[in-house]
Amino acid sequence: MPIFGKKNKSKENLTQNQQSPTDEPSRPAGSPETNGGGKVAKDNSPAQPPPRPKLVFHCQLAQGSPTGIIQGFTNVKELYGKIAECYEMPVSEILFCTLNTHKIDMTKLLGGQIGLDDFIFAHIKGRPKEMDVTKSEDALGLTITDNGAGYAFIKRIKEGSIMDRVPLIAVGDHIEKLDGKSLVGCRHYEVAKMLKEIPKGTTFTLRVVQPEMSGFSHVAASSGGKKKADFGSGKQTLRLRANGPATVEEDDDVSSIAVDKINNLLESYMGINDTDLSQSIWDMGKTCDNPSTFAMNIDESEFKEFGFTDDFIFDMWGAISDAKQGRLKAAAKEFNEQF
C-alpha cells in the first residue's frame, strides 16, 4: 500500500516501504564476478568507449509521498516531466524543486546542477491567492526567480518593503497573473521588468499560487544501527543544459564563488536570481581575455535579450576577472577565517 496518494501504476519507479535511497544497486545481469575460478576469454574486438553511466536520483513530493526513482533526463523540463510521470500528475502541478530538504528553502533550490547524491523534493501547487497592491514606493522589494519550466516565483522579500507589508504574499509563491494577464511561460526577468515598470502610486492586482503546505508526516522513522545517509555531500554534480546533453562535472570552488558573485549582481541590478544563468555567464567570461571581448560575446549571444547595460557588463567582468585571478577565492577564505 502506498504511503501517500493513489497507487502508482509504474511500480518500478516507486520504492517499496520508503526504501532508503542509499540501498546498494543490484549487480547487472551478465557482469563478471571477481571471485570466479574460470578464465575469461580474450576479446580481440575493437575497443568500445565506456557506456555513459545511468544516473539515478531519488525524489519525494515535499508534502509527503513514497520515494520515487528518477532517471533519463537532460534538462530541468525533462526532470519535471519524469517526476510528474512517476507520481501520475500533470507536469503543470510542479512549481519548483529543492535539494535535500522538503522545506521551502530558497538556498536549496534546484537550478542547473544536481549533486550526484542529492535527494530531490518536488513542491506542487497549493492554494491560489489574489490581492490588490498599491505601489507607494519605487521598488516593491521582491527578488524573482523561475523554475526553468515556465513558472516565475518569489525567492526573496526585502524586509520593510511594500511586499513585506502584504500579509498574504510569501517566499515560494508562484506569480501567476498580473492585472488578469497570465504570466505562465514568462521568464523571471520579464516578470521583474513588468513589476518594475508599474508607475508609482498605481494599484494593481496580483494573483499568486502558494506551494502545497500539507505536513511532512510520511517519512519512515530512522532504524537503529544504520548510519544516516549523508545526502548532498558529494563533489560531483550533474550539469543540466538547455541545449546539449547533461554532463557530470567536478565541483569547483572558484567557479562556485564566481557564480555566486554574478548571481548577486543579477539580483542587485535586475531583481532576479538565476544560478544557471550566472553559471552560463561565467562559462562564457572565463574564456575571455579582456572586457571588450566579453561585452562583444554578450551582445552576440542569447544573453542580448536581457538588455544588460554597459555598467552591468563591466561589473560582471570585474567579478569574472577577480575569480580567474583568485581574488574572490582569497576574499571568501579571509571572511571565513575571521567569522
Image: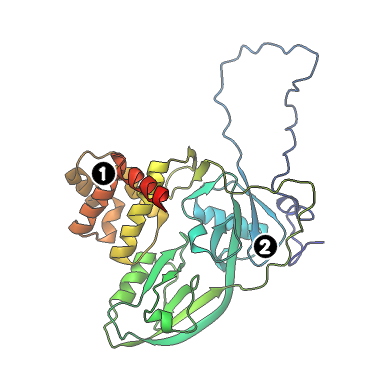
**Relative horizontal placement of residue 239, taking residue 103 as reference (left or right):** left
User: Residue drawn 76% across and 59% down?
Assistant: 220
User: Residue drawn 56% across and 16% down?
Assistant: 46
Q: Which sits earlier in the primary sequence, circle 2 or circle 1?
A: 2
What amino acid is labelled 1 in the image? Answer: Ser
From this viewpoint, is residue 279 visible?
no
Spatial CA span between label 2 and label 1 = 47 Å
The residue lying toward the viewer, choosing from 176 and 9, is 176
User: Residue drawn 67% across and 11% down?
Assistant: 42
From this viewpoint, is residue 291 visible?
yes
Q: Residue furthest front?
A: 338
Q: Which mark is residue 321?
A: 1
The residue lying toward the viewer, choosing from 89 and 58, is 58
Quadrant location, the C terminus: bottom left
Q: Residues within 10 Å of mark 1 (few under 14, many from 20)?
A: many
**Residue where numbered disc 2 is placed:** 88
**Relative horizontal placement of residue 298, taking residue 81 as reference (left or right):** left
What amino acid is labelled 2 in the image? Answer: Glu
Residue 310 location, x and y as percent? 18, 57
